[in-house]
């Protein structure tokens, strides 16, 4: 009698049934993993768009987030900011809502774009780089620039006003934002007695050699918090010289806290309570 080879019908049915069960268990996990990966890719793209926008704002970019988004997602990729077109893996479309880039697929917005790329980080880094660069220059190097400010005596002004005027002349403008009332506000710096600087903001977009120290918004760089007072204060009377009783950034922050300044939030370049 010839020996039978291969699978019997019963064995095939059992194998097919087992494969069906395994597929039934694996496919949902696979789909869930794919959806999660698409969400993460979408979030990463939207975060990159916001970070680039914040960085441009710190460099005095005048465009809006709506206009910037339209430029970077345009096909074909001919923008100067990304070497790819940032887009949703599930073919969702991007738009702007509450000063954030959102996806048309609602589930992708469950994880919001992080604010850890706040424009203030870029602004303060820019201030520090400027102060480090020009503070290290010799008097002759500064004179060779041609625009470094001088008093009537011709002496270089390595002071608050001197650095601020130099910054304004090199950059052409102050970094800007939006205050609690929807008005344009400008970020500036004040040298302090410990050799660092205090970031503050007011509504004057020009440079003034004096009288431009009034502010309702002061930044605590150690705590990464902004403080606001409707009465405000004048930093002009606070010397940045230790031997003249100047105050450190921490002492200035303690002073305004004791005066009842309230904490406010800076999202991107816009203040809110």
Image (spheres, helix red, strand yellow):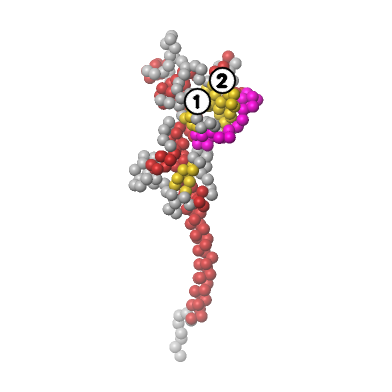
Q: Which residue is mark 1?
A: 203
Q: Quadrant of the C terminus?
A: top right
Question: Which residue occupies 52% across, 72% down?
Answer: 18
Relative depth, front residue between 167 and 139: 167
How many neighbours does mark 1 have within 10 angstroms: few (below 14), some (14-19), or many (20 or more)? some
Question: Which residue occupies 52% across, 45% down?
Answer: 112
The residue sitting at the top extreme is 153
The residue sitting at the bottom extreme is 1
Relative depth, front residue between 231 and 59: 231
How many neighbours does mark 2 have within 10 angstroms: few (below 14), some (14-19), or many (20 or more)? few
Label 1 or label 2, whichever lies nearer to me, is 1
Q: Using the numbered discs, state the Cα–Cα distance from disc 1 to disc 2 in whole angstroms.
A: 14 Å
Residue interval drawn in magenta: 254-273
Vertical placement of 67 versus 176: above or below? Answer: below
Tell me if residue 254 can be seen: no
Element class at badge 1: loop
Question: Which residue occupies 41% across, 22% down?
Answer: 169
Vertical placement of 47 versus 174: above or below? Answer: below
Q: Which residue is mark 2?
A: 234
The residue sitting at the right extreme is 258
Vertical placement of 73 versus 245: above or below? Answer: below
Q: How many marks?
A: 2
Residue 134 image offset from top left, x and y in percent:
44, 22
Residue 241 image offset from top left, x and y in percent:
55, 17
Tell me if residue 66 can be seen: yes
Left or right relative to 145: residue 158? right
Element class at badge 2: strand
Whether the magenta-drawn stretch holds residue 261 is answered as: yes
Whether the magenta-drawn stretch holds residue 98 is answered as: no
Relative depth, front residue between 192 and 199: 199
Residue 78 image offset from top left, x and y in percent:
34, 43
Residue 190 image offset from top left, x and y in percent:
52, 22
């Amino acid at each position: 009698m010839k020996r039978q080879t291969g699978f019997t019908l019963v064995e095939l049915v059992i194998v097919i049934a087992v494969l069906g069960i395994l597929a039934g268990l694996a496919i949902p996990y696979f789909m869930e993993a794919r959806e999660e990966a698409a969400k993460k890719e979408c979030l990463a793209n939207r975060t990159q768009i916001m970070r680039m926008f914040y960085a441009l704002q710190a460099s005095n970019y005048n465009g809006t987030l709506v206009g910037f988004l339209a430029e970077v997602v345009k096909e074909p990729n001919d923008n100067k900011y990304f070497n790819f077109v940032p887009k949703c893996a599930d073919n969702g479309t991007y738009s702007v809502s509450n000063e954030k880039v959102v996806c048309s697929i609602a589930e992708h917005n469950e994880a919001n774009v992080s604010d850890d790329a706040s424009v203030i980080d870029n602004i303060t880094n820019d201030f520090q780089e400027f102060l480090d660069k020009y503070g290290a220059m010799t008097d002759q190097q500064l004179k060779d620039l041609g625009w470094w400010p001088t008093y009537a005596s011709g002496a270089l002004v390595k002071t608050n006003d001197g650095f601020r005027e130099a910054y304004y002349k090199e950059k052409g403008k102050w970094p800007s934002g939006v205050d609690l009332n929807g008005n344009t506000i400008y970020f500036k710096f004040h040298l302090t007695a410990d050799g660092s600087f205090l970031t503050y903001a007011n509504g004057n977009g020009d440079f003034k050699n004096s009288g431009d120290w009034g502010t309702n918004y002061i930044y605590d760089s150690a705590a990464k918090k902004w403080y606001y007072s409707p009465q405000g204060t004048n930093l002009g009377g606070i010397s940045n010289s230790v031997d003249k009783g100047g105050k450190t950034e921490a002492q200035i922050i303690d002073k305004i806290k004791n005066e009842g300044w309230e904490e406010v939030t800076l999202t991107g370049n816009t203040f809110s309570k």
